[in-house]
Structure formats: structure tokens, C-alpha cells
Image: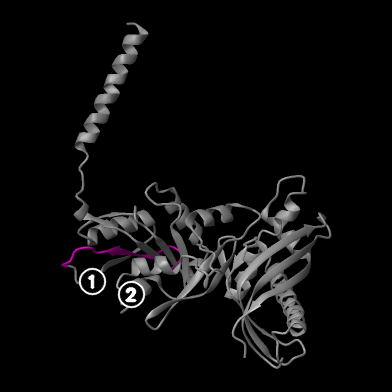
Amino acid sequence: MSRKVLCLMLFLQLFLLVACSSHKEKNVPLEDVGMVGIIAFDYIDKDNMKLTVAIPQYSPDAQRSTQTFSVVTELVSNGVVEIEKLSDKKIVFNQLRVVLFNEEFTREGNIRKVIEHLYRRAEVGNNVLIAVVKEKGEDMLKYNYPDKPNINFYLNDLLQPSINTAFNPNTTIRDFMYTITNPVYDPVIPFIDKNSDKIEMKGVALFKGDQMLELIDPKEALVIQAIQGRKNLAPLSMRMEQGHGVEKLLIDLVQNDVQIKSNKSMTSPKLTLSFEIKGTLVEYKGERSHVFTTGKLADLEKDVSKELEQDIKKFLYKLNELQVDPSGLSEYFRMYYRGKWSREKKREILDKLEIDVHVKTSIISTGTLK
């Protein structure tokens, strides 16, 4: 038998097999599909977790806009199978928007395995958002929010970055997998909590490897974004004492430019960070009178710069003590290192790192002043 005839016969057999399998595949009607919008993972013990899904209900006859199911499981896939037994629909993840982990789950270091599983599923998009919940994700999904009829859209919109929540790292599955596998970075994830009938952004969960280590506040998280080079930052609220009593001010429309220089030394590492901050003084409360005059404004700029230098330096040394690097500062030494960079090398650099911070603040206009 010639080679051409043999190839033709093999091709026909493959074609028939594909045709038969496609014919046997049962198409599921759209009304029989449950499209999961949010999935939450709560810690039970070292072997088990509680998996909760929220499925939007579009039927006008539905009493609630969201259907929720919860099961205790060891594996994500088994949990999905168990939920399908409870539901009258086929569960799919093509419309998954948000993944929640309760704080205990992240502190036990179980988050990476779950995200890797979701990351490998073809139907789950890489831009699915991640958040850490203070108590239980199940409770957050099942609670009835009077002015927010659909929890799926509510949480998705809340976790999207805006001008007032620009500190939010807006972490996606892809972002987490990038930072967790990159020896230069440590992951950060938004931290949310339920407050009465609302869900609030409380800060940012800071990770060391795949374990949540500490919660940092929005002002500290703003420093991370400034170091990473974000040009436009969230409004900057400050309380300072620089020789004029207690002063409170708000600087809006913050524009940031940062320059980072390394001494390239692995034995005595040092970084110099220079920030140029520009913004509008929206509101001021303090002892200084006529602060909007040229001389007074220049003095205020110097004091704001000094306060920011102290705050940024204090925060960065705090990160060094924790041996975590969410900003990727160790990259300024990795690029000069001959050899394979590792997380252990990063921790070693952070442990010895000396930091010098310079801030130049320019108030380009003023708003309502008291």
C-alpha cells in the first residue's frame, strides 16, 4: 500500500471519529446553564475548604437576583461537581468575575494552589479579580444588600480602580501568578470587609510568598504604586506636625514622577528614591494663616515634602524588616547580579538595604482653605 493511500485512510478515520464525538456531545440550552459570577473560598481545616458560588438569575420569575450554593470540599473540581448536584443547572465559569478568599485561608498559605487551578482552566479568564475577605466569603455573598440587588456586579465594580481608590492594586489571576512566580516581587491583594449594608475597601493584604503576612492601609499602599511609577495617584490626605501644630490637608490630582538609583552593591546595598509630587491643595486646616500666599505656600511645600520623606522611609524600612518587596525594589540589584536570582537572595538584599528618600512637592493650585 502506498504512503499516500495510507495517509488518506488515516485522515478519514480521524475525521469520522471527530464527527462521531461531536454528534454524541449534547448541547446544553442557555437557560439550563448556571454562569458563576463570583466564587469564594473559606478555610475549614488543613484538608478542607468551603466553596461558595454566586450565580446571577435573569429570569423575571426568580425571587432573588442571585442564587448561591455552598459545599465543603478538599478539591475545587469536586466542589463544582457537588454544587451541580444541588443546582438544576450546569455550572460553568465563562462569566467568572471575582474570586474571594477569607483572611484565614490566605494566612494558612492555601491560596496559590487554588489560583493555579483556576489559571489552568481554559474557560476562566486571566482578568478575573481577586480579593481577601476579613471574615467569611460565604456570608458576604449570601447577605442581602438593599441598594445593591446583584452582588456579582457590585463586587466587580467595587474592585475596579477609580480615582478615589487608586491605591487598589486591582489584582487579577494573571497578576498574582506573575508576582508569585517572580523572585523579585511579593503579591498584594485588595482587602475588603462588610460594614453594615455595604462592602468597604479596608486596605491591601501583603503577602510573603503565598502566605498573607500583614494588612497595610491605603496610604501605605499608595507608596507602593508611587515607587512602581504610576503617574496619577489617589488624593493624598495628610496629618502632619512640622512646627506649626497639628495640620490637616488634602492634596488632589496628584501627579508623580520617581527616579530610583542603585549603588549596585550586593554587600552594602543602597537605593536613592527621588519623588516629584504635583497636586492641588483642596483643603487645609491648621495654624498657618493666608497659606495660599507665595511665601506661605513655599513653606508648606517644604514641610509636606519633609513629612512624606519620613513616612515613605518609615514604610520602606518596615517592609525590609518583614523581608517583603511588593514594589520590586530588589530588581535594581538583580539587574547587576551575575547568576541566578532567587527569593532567598532578595530577602538577603532587603535585610541589608539602606534607603535614602527625597521628595519635592509642588502645589500648583489651591482650593477651599480653612
Q: Residues within 10 Å of mark 1 (few under 14, many from 20)?
A: some
Label pair 1/2, CB-CB below 8 angstroms: no
Q: Please give the name of the residue rendered at 40% of the width and 79% of the height, measured from the top-left corner.
A: 198
What's the residue type where badge 1 is placed? Arg
For the magenta stretch, what is the residue range? 45-61
Counting every numbered tag in the picture gives 2
In the rendered view, tell whether residue 289 sits above or below residue 306: below
Residue 194, position in %: x, y?
Answer: 42, 78
Judge from the rendering whether residue 162 lies leftward or rightward of residue 254; answer left or right.
left
Q: Quadrant of residue 315?
A: bottom right
* Disc 2 packing (10 Å; few <14; some 14–19; many ≥20): few
Q: Is residue 265 above or below residue 42?
A: above
Between 37 and 135, the residue placed more toward the observer is: 37
Q: Position of residue 320 (x, y in %)?
A: 71, 67
Instruction: Determine if residue 41 is in view.
Output: no
Q: Residue at x 39, y 65 (%)?
A: 40
Q: Going from the N terminus, do you reach mark 1 or mark 2 first? A: 1
Residue located farthest toward the front when viewing the structure as drawn: 293
Which image quadrant: the C terminus? bottom right
- Give the label on residue 148, or none: 2
63 on left or right of 259: left
Task: Give coordinates of residue 86: x percent, y percent.
Answer: 23, 62
Q: Name the residue that disc number 1 marks.
A: 64
Q: Nearer the viewer, residue 168 or 110?
A: 168
Residue 175 drawn above or below residue 2? below
The residues bearing labels 1 and 2 have C-alpha atoms spaced at a distance of: 12 Å
Q: Secondary structure at mark 1?
A: loop
Element carrying mark 2: loop
